[in-house]
């Protein structure tokens, strides 16, 4: 048995933020039904796939089912295609809500309300329903209608102001859509909290999640420093507020690095011993933590002269044996073939009917009794129409075929 067996989620999510939150719950056993329409595909289904040599697949309609990013964020889900702009399609969604527990979306504020699928409307047909809406700035407030994507969400949250090097302007945006991923994890937690509340009280509730606030919640130290000391945090590169050394250092292989962080004077002594107690280790500029912090530029040059003679894993092992926090800077290839990540199944190979064997990120936590699992690959577009409408909703074949013909189910 999986932790969330028996929980049914209707997922209107697109792109990253919404789909990842429900994917995390699907991995733990929730039945997640992804509502799609061929008129407006999930953005991650669109475009030519980045794997394979299928040039003709686009004309054959295969491409929406071949996108690797979509596969990762939508594994363990079902897909239905229904035009809920039509009254018959909207009626089908309402029927599905009656037998479901959660409705999730990451549309702009107002979209679900205009479709008649907002919390107040759904409560009339399922009083204990839980809804969650993930949006850039939340469902209310002066910025609620702002157009935002993951990286602009990071800018509005304040996180982008910290990206860059000491003494230089902010670099701009993160290459990773961290705003979406961060919001997804918070959303999964909020859904679980609402499910627990409903189990205790029998009542559902509406969850309004502002992705910008999820980002701001990670700026605790910077916000406290401003509140208490009047200082505005600036880019610091790899530097730390009190640790030195604290940086990535070049190794013998091209574009290979090792990350080293020393927190205490005892760790500094162990570091010096591990690298052979070189003469510069006794330099008065590096005697204690404060002096090392004040002279980081010179310190980093000396350390780089040592690391450049070692491979990343070699340097890591030398320092780790001495109790120093040091880790090779991993690329995706390094992680995929690393023995530790392989043993913990950080990446799992799964068979997709159109793509073949592909690697997806695994489940990052381990529950001893209900560990979760990837039971099925991401669904093809509309793959589960018959199961949902016939088996779950009890629709007969004649009615189903008629709705398909009328492009209500399509």
Image (cartoon, rainbow, N blue to C red):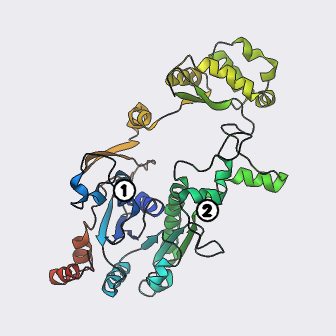
Question: Which numbered circle lies on residue 212?
Answer: 2
**Circle 2 SS class:** helix
Considering every residue shown, the one lying at the far right of the view is: 229
The CA span between labels 1 and 2 is 24 Å
Q: Which residue is mark 1?
A: 70
Q: Name the quadrant of the N terminus.
A: bottom left
Number of marks in the rendered image: 2
* 249 to 109, vertically: above or below: above
46 vs 308, left or right, is left
- Which residue is depicted at the point 48% across and 68% down? 106
Work out whether residue 46 or residue 110 is closer to the camera in this orientation and state it.
46
Q: Name the quadrant of the C terminus.
A: bottom left
- Which residue is depicted at the point 50% across and 59% down? 184
- Which residue is depicted at the point 35% across and 80% down? 84
Work out whether residue 236 or residue 275 is closer to the camera in this orientation and state it.
236
Whether residue 127 appears in this view of the structure is no
**Circle 1 SS class:** helix
* 188 to 119, vertically: above or below: above
Considering every residue shown, the one lying at the far left of the view is: 398
203 vs 58, left or right, is right
Q: Which image quadrant is residue 47 in?
A: bottom left
Q: Where is residue 289 drawn, in percent x and y?
A: 77, 29
């Amino acid at each position: 048995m999986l932790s969330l067996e028996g929980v049914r989620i209707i997922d209107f999510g697109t792109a990253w933020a919404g789909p990842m939150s429900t994917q995390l719950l699907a991995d733990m056993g929730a039945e997640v039904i992804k509502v799609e329409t061929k008129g407006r595909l999930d953005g991650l289904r669109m475009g030519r796939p980045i794997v394979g040599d299928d040039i003709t697949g686009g004309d054959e309609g295969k491409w929406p089912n071949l996108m690797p990013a979509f596969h990762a964020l939508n594994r363990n889900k079902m897909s239905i295609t229904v035009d809920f702009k039509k009254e018959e399609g909207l009626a089908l969604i309402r029927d599905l809500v009656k037998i479901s527990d959660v409705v999730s979306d990451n549309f702009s504020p107002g979209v679900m309300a205009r479709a008649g699928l907002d919390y107040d409307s759904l409560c009339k047909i399922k009083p204990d329903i839980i809804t969650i809406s993930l949006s850039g700035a939340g469902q209310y407030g002066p910025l609620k209608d702002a157009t935002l994507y993951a990286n602009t969400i990071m800018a509005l949250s304040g996180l982008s102001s910290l990206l860059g090097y000491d003494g230089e302007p902010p670099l701009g945006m993160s290459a990773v859509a961290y705003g979406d991923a961060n919001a997804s994890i918070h959303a999964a937690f909020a859904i679980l909290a609402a499910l627990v509340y409903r189990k205790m009280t029998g009542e559902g509730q509406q969850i309004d999640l502002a992705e910008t606030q999820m980002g701001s919640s990670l700026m605790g130290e910077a916000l406290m420093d401003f509140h208490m000391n009047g200082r505005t945090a600036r880019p610091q590169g790899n530097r730390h507020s009190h640790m030195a050394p604290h940086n990535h250092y070049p190794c013998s292989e091209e574009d290979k690095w090792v990350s080293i962080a020393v927190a205490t004077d005892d760790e500094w002594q162990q570091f010096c011993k591990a690298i052979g107690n070189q003469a510069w280790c006794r330099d008065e500029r590096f005697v204690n933590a404060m002096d090392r912090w004040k002279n980081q530029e010179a310190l980093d040059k000396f350390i780089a002269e040592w690391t450049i003679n070692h491979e990343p894993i070699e340097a890591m092992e030398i320092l780790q044996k001495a109790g120093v926090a040091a880790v090779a800077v991993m690329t995706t290839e390094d992680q995929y073939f690393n023995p530790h990540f392989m043993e913990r199944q950080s990446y799992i190979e799964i068979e997709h009917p159109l793509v073949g064997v592909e690697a997806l990120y695994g489940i990052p936590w381990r529950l001893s009794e209900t560990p979760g699992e990837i039971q099925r690959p991401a669904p093809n577009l509309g793959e589960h129409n018959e199961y949902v409408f016939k088996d779950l909703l009890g629709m007969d074949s004649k009615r189903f075929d008629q709705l398909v013909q009328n492009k209500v189910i399509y």
